[in-house]
């Protein structure tokens, strides 16, 4: 199935060992996807190929790089990749709470306790104000004095 003008394929998703391509121009073409699946299964390091003509999707499970598979398909005139793979996105670890954030949460919790004890105008508002000041310093990242003594 070497085509003079192979259809364009875009990368819908990629992760280690998996590559999903979309070929919208051939949506619904059962014969095309069946033949393409067989050809792609012959590519080096491909373990399994699943095609779905209804969704114009090709899932390739492999032991190499997705970029190498796209190059192979392009070199064999099976598909024309419209975009190349980006490196897989890595999740950035969530920022760990620092001491100032924990202190602000503790003071806020104390304010809620005082509120439930009926100390609305005394300690509850004072503690809530202190928590807000600590949180504000945390958000701004500055080292301003809690009393607002900034020039």
Image: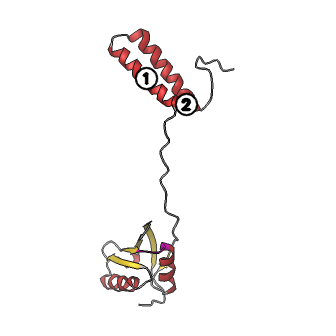
Q: Is residue 103 left or right of residue 54?
A: right
Q: Position of residue 150 (x, y in %)?
A: 66, 21
> Residue at left 35%, top 77%?
48
Q: Is residue 84 above or below residue 4?
A: above
Q: Position of residue 50 (x, y in %)?
A: 33, 76
Q: Is residue 99 above or below residue 6?
A: above
For this rendering, which residue is in front, 32 or 145? Answer: 145
Q: How many marks?
A: 2
N-term mark: 1 or 2? 1
Q: Alpha carbon of mark 1 to alpha carbon of mark 2: how far?
A: 14 Å
How packed mark 2 is, by other alpha carbons closer than 10 Å (few <14, some 14-19, many 20 or more), is: some
How packed mark 1 is, by other alpha carbons closer than 10 Å (few <14, some 14-19, many 20 or more), is: many
Q: Position of residue 66 (x, y in %)?
A: 47, 73
Residue 106 belongs to magenta span = no
Helix, strand or loop under label 1: helix
**Does the residue at mark 1 contact the one at mark 2 (Cβ under 8 Å)?**
no
| Quarter in which the N terminus is drawn | bottom left
Magenta-colored segment: predominant secondary structure: loop
Which residue has dot 2 on it? 138
> Residue at left 58%, top 31%?
140
Identify the disc placed on residue 108: 1
Helix, strand or loop under label 2: helix
Q: Position of residue 89 (x, y in %)?
A: 49, 59
- Residue farthest to the right? 151
Q: Which residues are magenta?
A: 62-66
Identify the disc placed on residue 8: none
> Residue at left 43%, top 23%?
108
For this rendering, which residue is in front, 42 or 22? Answer: 42
> Residue at left 55%, top 30%?
138
């Amino acid at each position: 199935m070497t085509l003079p003008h192979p259809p364009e394929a875009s990368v819908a998703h990629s992760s280690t060992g998996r590559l999903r391509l979309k070929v919208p121009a051939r949506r619904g073409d059962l014969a095309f996807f069946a033949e393409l699946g067989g050809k792609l299964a012959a590519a080096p390091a491909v373990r399994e190929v699943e095609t779905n003509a209804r969704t114009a999707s090709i899932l390739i499970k492999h032991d190499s790089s997705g970029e190498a598979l796209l190059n192979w398909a392009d070199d064999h005139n099976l598909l024309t990749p419209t975009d190349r793979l980006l490196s897989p996105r890595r999740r950035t670890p969530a920022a760990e709470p620092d001491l100032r954030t924990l202190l602000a949460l503790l003071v806020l919790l104390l304010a809620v306790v005082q509120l439930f004890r009926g100390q609305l105008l005394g300690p509850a508002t004072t503690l809530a104000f202190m928590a807000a000041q600590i949180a504000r310093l945390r958000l701004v990242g500055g080292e301003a004095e809690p009393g607002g003594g900034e020039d």
